Image: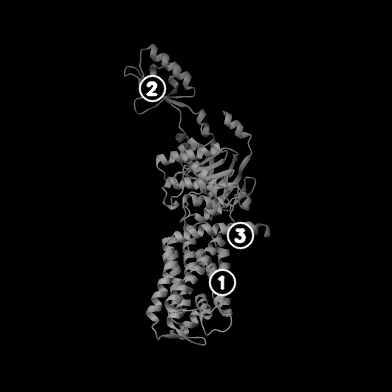
Amino acid sequence: MTATLGPAVSMAGHQFRYDMRAFLRNRQARFFTLALPVIFLVLFGNVFGGKNDTVAVAGGRMDASVYYVPGIITLGVVAAAFVNLVISVTAQRETGVLKRRRATPVPASAVIAGRALTAVVVAVAMATVLLAVGWAAYDARVPARTLPALYLTVVVGAMAFCCLGYAVASVIRDHDAAQPITQAIILPLYFISGVFVPVDTLPNWLVQVAGFFPVRHLAAALLTAFNPHTTGAGVAGRDLLVVVAWGVAGLVIALRRFSWLPRSR
Amino acid sequence: MSAGSLSEGRLASAEVVVSVRELVKRYGAQEAVRGIDLDVRAGEIFAFLGPNGAGKTTTVEILEGFRPRTSGTVSVLGEDPATAGGAWRDRIGVVLQESEPEPGLSVRECVQLYAGYYRSPRDVDATLELVGLADRPDATATRLSGGQRRRLDVALALIGDPDLIFLDEPTTGFDPSARRAAWDVVAGLRDLGKTVFLTTHYMDEAEHLADRIAVVAGGRIVAEGTPQTLGGRDRMRATIRFTLPSAIDDGDLPDALRPLAEPSTDGRTVLLSDSPLVHLRLLAEWAIGRGVDLPDLDVRRPTLEDVYLALTAPAETP
């Protein structure tokens, strides 16, 4: 195993360079993954974040416009690591791209890791862009003390959602179904997880439901790292643990069900 | 195996790179492959010819390692494809029946991506040159025409410098000029010394490209041979056709030719001959002697298509 690890890592790097290029050249990916989170941040901050609006958070209150920054970072991470990955991996499988790669000596781990690395890098870049927009537009500042925790959360969240993405892609049969299925899964979760609507305005039972799913915990972990009232390093251990547990569950399903061959034929 | 040509003699002594014995593949109750035996030797272009649904793609996908088999033994480059790993894949190239180019990448980038998968790849630009895409390296791969995509597929299969290349129906859906161009690319693989395993349902494609053909129908091989000898084609009788002037009928033909006459519907005389040269000479001497001209005289050997249709027609309803 260790003998093949070196080549597999360098091949994952090789795959990553081309996956990244393909991602950046895809107009749909550029809009939904790169532009839309920025548009949402600007819209939500302006629509819901009036000057005097504040949101209750652990330890006190924060400006509503600032509150949306970690929320939309959640959306950015999920869009890059989950939605975009499910759509592109399903399309690659159904059009025979994965099958043709499978006929070459490239290790499966390198193909999967190269694609996942693309998602993680995009998620980190999106988090950075959204932080900059939040800072410029709403004076939203992350304490330097908790900045490492914020990026740690972004990376862990992106990796977990990649695993979930591979799991969902592995059960979707049809290329055309990928987009509606992922949106149907993820849009309601955004609404009940504090991404689009502050959690303190939601009925308690809905928050309980959201608490079962990973989007809520990713958003909560990002909010912890973002919240100026947070003491210490800002690592939301319990929330991250739930996100990781979902990722592991996704990984188990993906490993059992992942297919290189088209499934609709 | 009769009538061994020079190249056949060379190939007969070459190493066996694909060996299949009693291969069976069942999908539930349906038996797609029902006991196939075949050998492919190094350096030959082997065509697996048959109608749609004959079991061609199932067989080739078992050889490529994509599908498990129900029973039988399979050896490709000395390994069982069901268990072979990366080192084995380093030595094969695969052109799938249906696959789209890598999304978002240019032609050259697609080939560069694949070059990185192999231990000792061929030169990217030389490979593009070989398949005839050297003038479009920066084109977006997904915007290529069908024929150009196929060339790119061949480039991707070749970039690892494999010993053995599988081509699954490489020209299905092509217009005639794109087919000709694709044939040139495949013929070029022979010059590189590659072994080619080709599946096709076009008889003329097999005849044009292959050193050896196996005809498959209903999951079984029904005939095997060179394009010249397939199905006993070289030993089949030739058809001699001509129209006699109205004053003369079949009964006036020389004694040696009269028993060869077959009934015909169009008023022409039809002779089935196993030694057409001898019989044509007799016919010519007789006609010249009688001052009879035979302006529409033609002699026809059975085409590979005749043989193919005869071989596959009854086997389709098992």
Residue A211 to residue A127: above or below: below
Q: Do tag 1 and tag 2 residues touch (Cβ < 8 Å)?
A: no
Residue A216 to residue B71: above or below: below
Residue at image location 39% in from the left, 81% down from the top: A48
Quarter of the image where the N terminus of chain B is located: top right
Which of A121/B170 is in front?
A121
Q: Earlier in the sequence, mark 3 or mark 1?
A: 3
Extreme residue toward the bottom, this view: A60
Q: Position of residue A245 (x, y in %)?
A: 58, 74
Left or right for B7, reference A205? right
- Residue B138 disc label: none
- Residue A156 disc label: 1
- Residue A9 disc label: 3
Residue at image location 65% in from the left, 45% down from the top: B78
The CA span between labels 2 and 3 is: 72 Å
Query: Dot 2: few (<14), some (14–19), or many (≥20) neighbours within 10 Å?
Result: few
Which of B76/B22 is in front?
B76
Asked if both marks, 1 and 2, belong to the same chain, the answer given is no
Q: Secondary structure at mark 2?
A: loop
Residue placed under numbered mark 2 in the picture: B297
Left or right for B38, reference B240? right
Extreme residue toward the top, this view: B289
Circle 1: residue type = Val
